[in-house]
Amino acid sequence: MKVSVIGGGTMGNGIAQVFAQHGHEVNLIDVKQEYLDRALGTIEKNLGRMVKKEKISQDDADATLKRLQPVIGLENAADSDLVIEAVFENYEVKKEIFTKLDEVCKPGAILASNTSSISLTRIAACTKRPESVIGMHFMNPVPIMKLVEIICGQATGDETLATVTQIAKDLHKVPVTVQDYPGFISNRVLLPMINEAAYCLMEGVADRDAIDTVMKLGMAHPMGPLTLADFIGLDVCLDIMNVLYEGFGDSKYRPCPLLRRMVDAGHLGRKSGKGFYDYE
Ligand SMILES: NC(=O)c1ccc[n+]([C@@H]2O[C@H](COP(=O)([O-])OP(=O)(O)OC[C@H]3O[C@@H](n4cnc5c(N)ncnc54)[C@H](O)[C@@H]3O)[C@@H](O)[C@H]2O)c1
């Protein structure tokens, strides 16, 4: 199967790697050569690490890299059977991409999005093939995390769902089908917990370390919610809470004022050097 991945960032390079490792020819499409070089560099490093740990052979790594074509321009997706979009989490950007993909891709090609929160029904409506549009929500880091949340928009066809479910299984992932409601399952359940942890901190229920320790040792979570929020990015957490709040119109999803204040201050977590924890 020919696959195109749009966007070679954090998620896109991982998705491209996994497909190439499983024998698919993959076009990795981005807007600038330097982004493609960086994506390929990341994939090469990841594969090198797997060779060192003896999880794959050097021949496997070389063959995987050979199956990856870094290219600029969406028209390169024209003969793909499956296209997975992994660009910025912004509806206008995705709208432009899906409109163009619908024009250039062959009839019957499946157009998937890796969006973490934008409505698949809305994305599908940008195309004349909403029955072939679906969400494939991979988790970060893609080569390691087993889950793929598969999101059906209002018009997604049964055949598209069946094909994509089988593809996920063939990649040795575990697909879970969910309907198109704000936050799907993953972020609808995870983000309110993180938001509530921020409320606990703001209200002085306990300090940062105590909150994380309760969830780590008491609930066997691998990391506490405030540590996890720093990993995800506090701006991303706030965006997703806003999607839930606006999507359901329910006050239980109101973003914590402390989360807002930290984002306003530029304290975004690991990526900015400071969030609930210090990284400098
Ligand atoms: N980062 C995560 O942990 C995570 C987890 C699950 C899902 N997601 C979702 O995956 C998607 C991508 O997130 P990311 O973190 O990889 O983003 P990122 O910012 O790391 O990468 C986005 C890439 O898209 C490229 N791009 C932008 N416009 C483009 C265009 N018109 N054509 C081709 N390439 C274009 C950018 O140059 C960049 O390389 C988002 O929808 C996000 O919500 C992210």
Image (cartoon, rainbow, N blue to C red):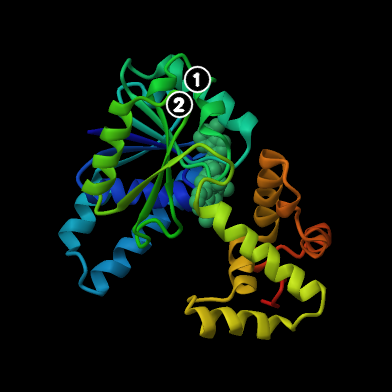
- Label 1 is placed on what type of residue? Lys
Instruction: Say which of 12 and 33 sits in front.
Output: 12
Asked if disc 1 and disc 2 are in contact, CB closer than 8 Å, the reply is: yes
Tell me: is circle 2 under 8 Å from ligand 1.
yes
Tell me: is circle 1 under 8 Å from ligand 1.
no
Q: Quadrant of the C terminus?
A: bottom right
Q: Residue at x 60, y 83 (%)?
A: 214
Instruction: Say which of 270 and 74 sits in front.
Output: 270
Quarter where residue 248 is shown: top right
| Left or right placement of residue 79 versus residue 10 in this view | left
Q: CA distance from mark 1 to mark 2?
A: 7 Å
Instruction: Say which of 29 and 240 sits in front.
Output: 240
| Left or right placement of residue 206 versus residue 14 in this view | right
Quarter where residue 70 is shown: top left
Which tag is nearer the camera, tag 1 or tag 2?
1
Which residue is tagged 1?
100
| Left or right placement of residue 13 versus residue 31 in this view | left
Q: Residue at x 21, y 69 (%)?
A: 55
Counting from the top left corner in percent of width and height, residue 1 is at 22, 33
Which residue is tagged 2?
74
Count neighbours of disc 1 (C-alpha within 10 A) and say few if under 14, some if 14 to 19, many if 20 or more.
some
Q: Residue at x 66, y 80 (%)?
A: 211
Pointer 1 or 2: first along the chain: 2
In the rendered view, would you say 93 is above or below 116? above
Counting from the top left corner in percent of width and height, residue 276 is at 71, 73
Count neighbours of disc 2 (C-alpha within 10 A) and say few if under 14, some if 14 to 19, many if 20 or more.
many
- Label 2 is placed on what type of residue? Leu
| Element at label 1 | helix
